Image: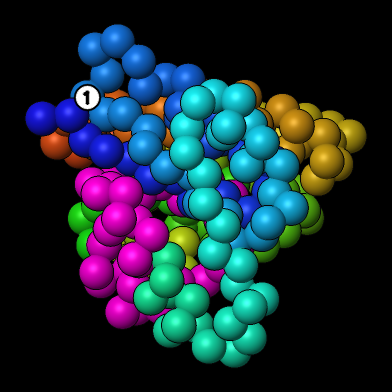
């Protein structure tokens, strides 16, 4: 069965683009929708150029009503008959009710070697901690922020003179390699972790 994938974005959508471009040929999934919480997100135009439908659920229209926002987001995903949801730079914290509804069907990519550095400013935090390496993690989404079973990690060394910006720039191509590789396995019901550049999932 071919899985129908919806991708949630908030910005430029480079990881979304990598995911969409990977879902061809024998891939067990196909992209059906890109959704953003920001009508000005650059990734919306990229989705249209890639031939993928797009939709906006503007969180600002809901004010502090997170439940109302998520009800509309869920309606859009259900209308698209999405089987899987990939968060790709989606900058909204989802409530436990939403994550439970999509439990076992929602992935996220995070720019750190989880469980290190949940949340924001991960590149800066890794440099300031004196870490020898940095990386990114794809995991199942649960109610806890940047938690859930780890499905893949990619690693790279932190170089002398690295800044948060240079580190982020060097990491991005690995994100674009890791996320599609994990999605391909996940859509085929294979939870074997994808490891790029290392073998220890917890360091």
Quarter of the figure with residue 7: top left
In the orientation shown, which residue stands out farthest toward the bottom?
64
Q: Give the left or right position of residue 26, taking residue 150 as reference.
A: left
| Residue 78 colored in magenta in the image | yes
Q: What residue lies at 58% left-to-right and 32% top-to-bottom?
A: 48
Question: Which residues make up the magenta segment?
Answer: 74-102
* Residue name at image x 43 percent, y 84 percent: 67
Residue beneath disc 1: 28
Quadrant where the image shows the N terminus: top left
In the rendered image, the vertical position of residue 160 relative to residue 56, given as above or below: above
Question: For mark 1, does the 10 Å Cα neighbourhood hold few (<14), some (14 to 19), or many (20 or more) residues?
Answer: some
The residue shown at (60%, 72%) is: 59
The reply to whether residue 156 is in sight is no
Q: Is residue 11 magenta?
A: no
- x, y (%) of residue 5? 33, 40
Is 82 rendered above or below residue 192?
A: below
Front residue of this view, candidates 101 and 112: 101
How far from the left and from the top, in percent, is residue 144?
40, 72
From this view, report whether residue 14 is shown above or below residue 73: above
Vertical arrangement, residue 73 with respect to residue 114, above or below: below
Point out residue 138 in the picture as x, y percentages from the top left corner: 42, 44
For label 1, the SS is loop
Looking at the image, what colour scheme do you see? rainbow
Residue 3 image position (x, y, % from top left): 21, 35
Q: What is the quadrant of residue 161 in the picture?
A: top right
């Amino acid at each position: 069965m071919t899985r129908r994938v919806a991708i949630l974005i908030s910005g430029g959508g480079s990881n979304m683009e990598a995911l969409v471009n990977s879902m061809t040929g024998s891939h067990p999934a196909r992209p059906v929708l890109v959704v953003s919480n920001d009508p000005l997100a650059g990734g919306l135009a990229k989705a249209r150029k890639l031939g993928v439908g797009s939709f906006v659920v503007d969180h600002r229209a809901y004010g502090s009503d997170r439940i109302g926002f998520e009800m509309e987001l869920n309606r859009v995903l259900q209308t698209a008959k999405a089987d899987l949801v990939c968060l790709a730079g989606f900058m909204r914290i989802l409530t436990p009710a939403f994550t439970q509804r999509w439990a076992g069907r929602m992935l996220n990519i995070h720019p750190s070697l989880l469980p290190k550095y949940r949340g924001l400013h991960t590149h800066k935090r890794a440099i300031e901690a004196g870490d020898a390496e940095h990386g990114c993690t794809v995991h199942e989404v649960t109610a806890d922020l940047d938690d859930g079973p780890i499905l893949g990690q990619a690693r790279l060394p932190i170089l002398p003179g690295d800044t948060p910006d240079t580190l982020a720039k060097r990491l991005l191509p690995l994100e674009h390699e890791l996320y599609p590789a994990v999605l391909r396995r996940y859509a085929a019901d294979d939870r074997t972790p994808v490891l790029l550049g290392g073998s220890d999932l917890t360091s």
